[in-house]
Image (cartoon, rainbow, N blue to C red):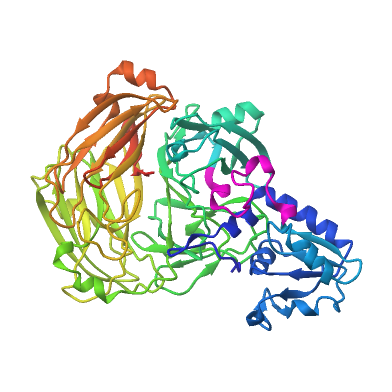
Amino acid sequence: MLEIETFDQRRGGNVIYKALAHPLAAEAVAKLYARLAAHAPVALFDPDGIAPALLALYPEIPPLAGIFVQDVRAIGTVRAGHSCRPLTELPASAARAVLIAAFDTQRMEPRVAAEAPPGAAIASLDAVRLPEAMLGNRRRTLDPLNYATNYAFFRDADGLATRLVTANYWAGYGAREVRLWLCLFGDGGDVLASWEEAAPAGPGGIVIDSRAVRARFGLSPFRGQLFMHVIGAAGHDVIKYALDTFSVNGRAAPVLSCTHDANAWPADRYAGLPAPRPDETVLLWVQNSHAAPIPAGGITLDRMGAEAPVALTEPVAGYATLALDVGKLLPDVHWPAQIEVRTGRHVVRPRYEVVRGGRAHIAHVNVERSDLQPDPGIRTLSNLLGRGFLLPFPVLARRDFRTLVQPNPMAESQETLPLRIEVFDAAGALIAERFLGALPRRHDLAVDLDTVLPDGALLDEGGHAELVYDFREGGEADGWMHALMRYEHRVSGHAAETSFGSHIFNTLMTWKDEPQSYGGPPPGLSTRLFLKLGEGGRRSFSVLVYPASAVWRARSETALLLHDGDGKVIAEERIAIACSGSALIYPDAVFPAAALAAAGPAGYVLVRDTTCRLFGYHGLQADGGLFSLDHMFGF
């Protein structure tokens, strides 16, 4: 496992990791190491504890004369396999060069040089600092907003194309002159292209289409990853996006699928990977997020709860992409079993692809928490919080779709999932429920809602269901309830799936950081969701769910704001959703055709509500039973 700190729930993302893992930093570190090689051995002065991450991501450093520290409490501790020595020993060391493992060292360098052995070369991580033009805050390199970055699974090959859409939501936080620096890696980890694009001046839409990229740079077919860096960001240091995958050039088995942002930080483990049916192939797209190769055995798969991981025996080059056939590594594990992915912090949240009868759909696994333990307080939550934690998801119209749900353990300590499922119609009436039991970690349950709903409940307008904790047979809870939701078109066989976790929704009283809001502290009384528009004959839609843990406002006051490509609001419609109800929204049924045409290919709908927090899912529909579905993002 890489000895790097990436993200934790208390402090958020680790900007040091982002600064070191940036592709431009990788190029600069290689040059820095080459210069230091002429002055080996090198003393590594580590005032901020950066050395373990630096040496984990870039182990090819020239021979070391030791790691030196200022803090007397750190003397004798081990960092990257070296026992730390006091800085007072630096003058007598054999070092011919000193590397200061810190940024913004202008004041520090003269002092370190005065203590270094005579004639020693002095360098620092300022040598791998991003170019000035890419830093919004040039006085503080490690400002998180200097590293608003993310990855996307990006390809244009095999009759499939990808289209990434987002908005310049940083403009809403005061950002000016926002630009995107983009770097496209091929499957071997080689850089296929790098370029910059200007974002709209206001909160306008942003579109990056693989077909346009391929044509612009004259590229051959590619399967790789797109690294994105927003320059001049404000408010958010993560790039949120929706990514569509669709078939082109008359592909025999048409494809339409969507997924969303990659979560930006590598984790130890991921969960929620479905095992294949006997007639399916499940491909896990392993995309190395770093310049250092993933060694053979660095990626393992395990049936959830089995504790018998099986290793990928081949290495993965820096920034490379590998399609791992799950069935070949775990041939005896089948749906509805689920698989745990152990990545050793080498990759950000991976994508997977389910292929069946030539059709395919894309989804993602989720971060499995290593820092979370069961909380007995959840069993006795105040009745002021009503039903407490809820995981809402759409139930699509039964005449056309099957809806299945598979609860997923999403913390290493999670041994039981005590759950109940409740189903609501669009008007908010509870029409069915089922106790699922205190499910063990290794369960193989996937619930077909056809077996839960009464025969007459066709839900022509759709509805939604909620997973909720239920302790009637015991069990433990940690608030990190997750599930995979799979949708199948009854005629075409096309499928889509999505996954997400639970929250406490729409209560006046709070518990820890719940309920959450899209901005500010709890209670979560706001909604700001991004809905892309249709394109290329594909019709956009959204399912908006109004979940409530306790009694809340009877109906929402929801605004649908149509923005053009420059971010200007050109049309507005209002709807009301019943509490515990839902609404199926088609932008082309809400807004006039002329307004949609004026919005253009980068236009979008912002779903806004200041009276409640809605939870949303979005997708596209096309002829032949093609559809996609994933949860929406907010900003």
| Residue 398 seen by the camera | no
- For the point 64% across and 68% down, which residue is it? 48
Judge left or right: residue 590 versus residue 368. Answer: left
Whether residue 135 is in magenta: the answer is yes
The answer to which of 453 and 513 lies nearer the viewer is 513
Does residue 204 sit above or below 322 in this rendering?
Answer: above
- For the point 60% across and 30% down, which residue is it? 214
Judge left or right: residue 204 versus residue 226. Answer: left
- For the point 25% across and 47% down, which residue is it? 613
Q: Which residues are magenta?
A: 126-153
The residue most toward the top is 594
- Residue 77 on image: x %, y %: 65, 81
Does residue 490 sit above or below 366 in this rendering?
Answer: above
Judge left or right: residue 462 versus residue 492. Answer: left
Whether residue 193 is in magenta: the answer is no
- For the point 22% across and 46% down, which residue is it? 612
| Residue 3 seen by the camera | yes
Q: Quadrant of the N terminus?
A: bottom right
- Residue 420 on image: x %, y %: 19, 63
